[in-house]
Amino acid sequence: MGKYHELAEKIVKNVGGQENINSLTHCITRLRFKLKDESQANDDVLKNMDGVVTVMKSGGQYQVVIGNHVPAVYEEVVSIAGLSGEREEEASSGNLFDRLIDILSGCFQPFLGALAAAGMVKGLNALLVFLKLYTATSGTYTMLNGIGDAIFYFMPVILGYTAAKKFRLHPMVGIVIGAALCYPTIQGSALQTAFETTAGAGAAAPYNLFGLPAYDTFIGIPWVGANYTSSVVPIIFIIAFAAQVQKVFKRIIPEVVQTFLVPFFVLLIALPIGFLVIGPIVSMLTDLLSAGFTALMSFSPALYGLILGFFWQVLVIFGLHWSVVPLAIMQVTQEGSSQVLTGSFAASFAQTAVVLAMFFKLKDKKLKALCPPAIISGIFGVTEPAIYGITLPKKWPFIYSMIGGAVGGLYLMINNVTAYTMGGLGIFGVLNFINGDDASGMIQSFIAIAIAAVVGFGLTFFFWKDNTVEEEVIIDKTTIKKENITSPVKGRVLSLKNAEDPAFANGALGNGVVIEPTEGKVVAPFDGTIVTLFPTKHALGLISDNGTELLIHIGIDTVQLEGEGFEAFVKQGDRVKKGQTLVTFDLEGIKKAGFSTQIPIVVTNTADYLDILEVGSNEVSTSDDLLTALI
C-alpha cells in the first residue's frame, strides 16, 4: 500500500465515487477530474482534507489541488478507482471557451514534464557554450542539442498521441499522423526545392491558394506546401477531424476487420484533407494570431509586460493560461524565439517572496509551517501551494504578488528580453533566455527576479498586517454581539442538509435552514437592502444594516418557470424594512409544475461570523426568529 493510498481513497469517495468519474489527468500540482455530476462531489470536505490544498472548477474540469506529490496520488487514485489511460470521456460540457481550454490543457499537460526537461537541456547546452567549455561546432554540443531539440522538432508526433487520447482516436493512429506531418519530402520547403530543381531556381509557383504558393498537386488538386515539423496547432485540428472519420468507419465496418481497416481509411482520408485543406488554413490563422501578438507587443512592450505580469497568476488559477502557452511553444519551435510569455516569468518569484515575508509576520503556527515548503516549490516554479494555501486566502498578499509580477514583467519587456527555448520552470527558466554565446537575457531575467521579489516582499512586509491575534481577542471577550434573523416565510423548518439542491445541502453557499412553505409570501427578515433580485423573481439576496448577507431561494429549479407565478414588490437596490412584503408566489402552481417548493435560506457570508445558530423551532411564522448570527 502506497504512502498516499489513504488520501487517494478519501479523494475518490468525495468526488462522488468511482462511478462518478469519467476520466482523470493531472498536471504538476492538480488532479483534473471530468465528473459525470460535479454536484456529487463534496467540496468542503475536500478543501479541508489534510493533503489537499483546495478545489477549483474550471474548463469543465473538477480540479483537486494537491501539490508537488500529485503524480504519486494520481497513481493511487487510478488504481483505487479502476481507471485506465484508455478510458473514454464524455463530451466536454460548458461553453465554447471552456471546451477550448479543456482541449488545449488535455493535449499539453501529459508531456509538460518532458518539455521542461528538454528545455533545460537546451538551456544548459547554451550556458556551457557561453562559459566556453566547448564550442557550438563540437560533438558534445551536437549531441546535447539533439537531445534537447528532439521534442520540439517532432512536436506533431507528441501532440498526435496526446490529442488522439483527448479526441478518442486510436493513439497509435495519432502518432502515425504526427509522423506523416514530419516526413521530410512533404514539407513545404522540400516541395519548393523539388519544383525549382526542374523549373529553375526562383521560378514562380504554378498554383496559389489562400494567398499561399502550391508547388505540386494531389490527384490534380493543388497542394499548398507548409512546414509542419515543430508545428503545434495543425496537428490538433487534423486529429480532431480524424477522430470523426474513425467514428464513422467504426459504425460501418464489421468488427472482425476494424483493427486494420478503420486506421486504413482514417489515414487515407484524414491526412490528404489535412495536407490539402486543414493544415494550410490553420497555419495561416496561427500566423495571423502570432502576428497579432507581435503587433500588440510592438505597440507597447511595457504595457504588455505590465498587464501579463499582473494577471498571470490569476490566469493560472482559472487555467486560462492555456490560451497563451501553445502560441509561445509554436513561436519558439518555428521561429526560434518568443516574447509571448516573457512578461509572466517573474510572477512566480513575486509570489514566493510574498510567502517569505508572510513567514516573518504570521502568528498562526499551522499556516506558518506551510511557508517553507511553499517557498522551496515556488523557487522551482510550482506556486499552487503558495497561492491556494497561503496568499489567496489572505487576499492582500496575493494582490501584492500580482503587483510584484507586474513590475517584473514591465522590466523584462522594456529590456526586450526574449526566450529561445521553452520548458525551464522557476529558477531553471533563466536558461530559456540564453541565445548562443549571448547571456544578456539571462542576466536581465535575474534582475527581473530580484525586482519582482523585492516589490512583493516589501509590500507584504511593510503593509500587510496579520489580524489573527486581534481576532482571537475578540473571540475571548465575554460580550459576543449577535444579529437575529426572523423568518421571511411561514412554514415548516428543516435542517439545511435536507435541501433537495446539493449546492445548498453541502453548505457550499453558506449556513442556514430550509423551509417548506405553507404560504406564498416572502417578507424582509431584517432592515436592509435588496442586493440581488433575479429576473425570474425566484431568488433574491439581501444585506442587513449590520452586514449580514442572506440568500432566499424560492423552490428548487424554479428558474425554469421563467418568472411565471412570481410577483416582486421590490427591485434591486431598494431599502426595505423588517416584515415588508418582497415577493409573492403561486405555491400550488409550483407544485403542479412538478417543482419542489422548498425554500433554502442561507447566510452567504457565513465565514464572517463565529457561528450561525438555528433557533430550533419546527414551525415558524414571518415574525418568529429563525437564525442567529454570532459576530
Image (tube, rainbow, N blue to C red):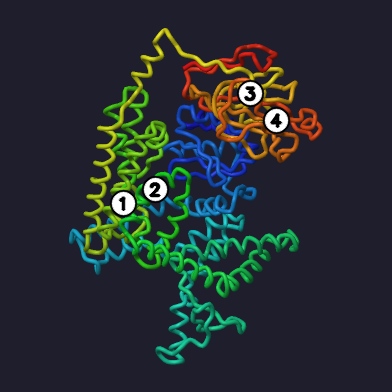
Quick check: can you spot residue 17?
no
Which mark is first along the chain, 1 or 4? 1
Q: What is the C-alpha distance between the residues marked 4 and 3?
A: 20 Å
- Count residues near mark 3 (Cα–Cα under 10 Å), then give few for <14, some for 14-19, many for 20+: some
Please name the residue that numbered disc 1 is placed on: 409
- Mark sitting earlier along the chain (2/1): 2
- Which mark, residue 580? 3
Q: Is residue 525 visible?
A: yes
Name the image quarter holding residue 488: top right
Residue at image x 58%, y 26%?
576
Q: Position of residue 259 (x, y in %)?
A: 67, 61
Numbered circle sitting on residue 311: none
Q: Nearer the viewer, residue 491 or 55?
A: 491
- Decide: few, some or many residues near mark 2? Use Cα within 10 Å; few <14, some 14-19, many ≥20: many
Q: Amino acid at mark 2?
A: Trp
**Element carrying mark 2:** helix
Task: Indicate which label's residue lies in the foreground, 4 or 3.
Answer: 3
Earlier in the chain: of badge 4 and badge 3, it is 4
Q: Which residue is mark 4?
A: 555
Q: Which mark is residue 312?
A: 2
Residue 242's spot in the image, x, y percent?
61, 64
Residue at position x 34%, y 18% in the image: 470
